[in-house]
Image (tube, helix red, strand yellow):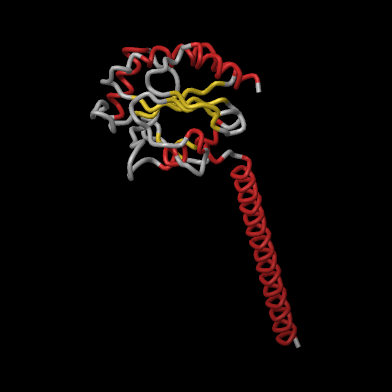
Amino acid sequence: RTARRGCASRASAGAVSAKEILMKGWKLAVGLMLGLGAILMTQIHESVAEEAGRKSTPPVLNFKMQSLAGQEVELSRYAGKVVLMVNTASKCGYTKQYKGLQELHGKYAAQGLAVLGFPSNDFGKQEPGTNEEIGEFCRQNYGVGFDMFAKIAVTGQNAAPLYQYLTGQETDPQFAGPVKWNFEKFLIGRDGRILARFRSKVEPTSATMIESIEAALKE
């Protein structure tokens, strides 16, 4: 009898042990499912938020560019601002316009103006330097504090998608057509519409540009 009791006791202990293992396994499985569910819901929420962000971002700012330091920049960060986009060059007769652009930045940035510089070597090969050299030139000679981006093409078949959009006939026929030279300027309203386009010879601090910028800032 004693032997039988011992066997029964061991069998009971084995059964309890198996039950505990099953319970632990079940709890682990439930925990994993809950964890995966939470991750999935987070991804869904992030995807929905990202999609909503894309829909609320004007098409002109729905581009990714690179900073002079090589970091990716989403232009959507400028949504809600008045944006002045300028194709720049360091060895051009209009290079001195950096001074006027910096003055605009200093005077109107706090009111919502974002000046964006896009160096290009398209015209007369007047921007031959590296992105690092361009940044150093702008800081040393003009104290540029507005955002500058990596060198791009702004005209022709290799033009950056941003400039294909800016100059496209389907975007706005009034301001369509290829960029003709360095320091052309596109003024973008808070709602993402192209409000004005200024050719190279128009100085950043001219009455025409100041008037347009101040009117855009009031909208």
Q: Residue furthest front?
A: 174
Which quadrant holds residue 134?
Answer: top left
Which quadrant holds residue 76?
Answer: top right
Residue 144 x/y as whole percent: 40, 16
- Closest to the observer, 138 or 26: 138
Residue 17 x/y as whole percent: 68, 72
Task: Give the position of the N terminus as an image quadrant.
Answer: bottom right
Is 17 on the left or on the right of 198, as rendered? right
Residue 212 x/y as whole percent: 55, 19
Residue 84 appearing in the image: yes
Is 17 on the left or on the right of 94, as rendered? right
Asked if residue 3 is positioned above or below residue 165 in the image, the reply reads: below
- Closest to the observer, 133 or 203: 203
Asked if residue 66 is positioned above or below residue 117 in the image, the reply reads: below
Asked if residue 133 is positioned above or below residue 103 in the image, the reply reads: below
Residue 114 x/y as whole percent: 51, 23
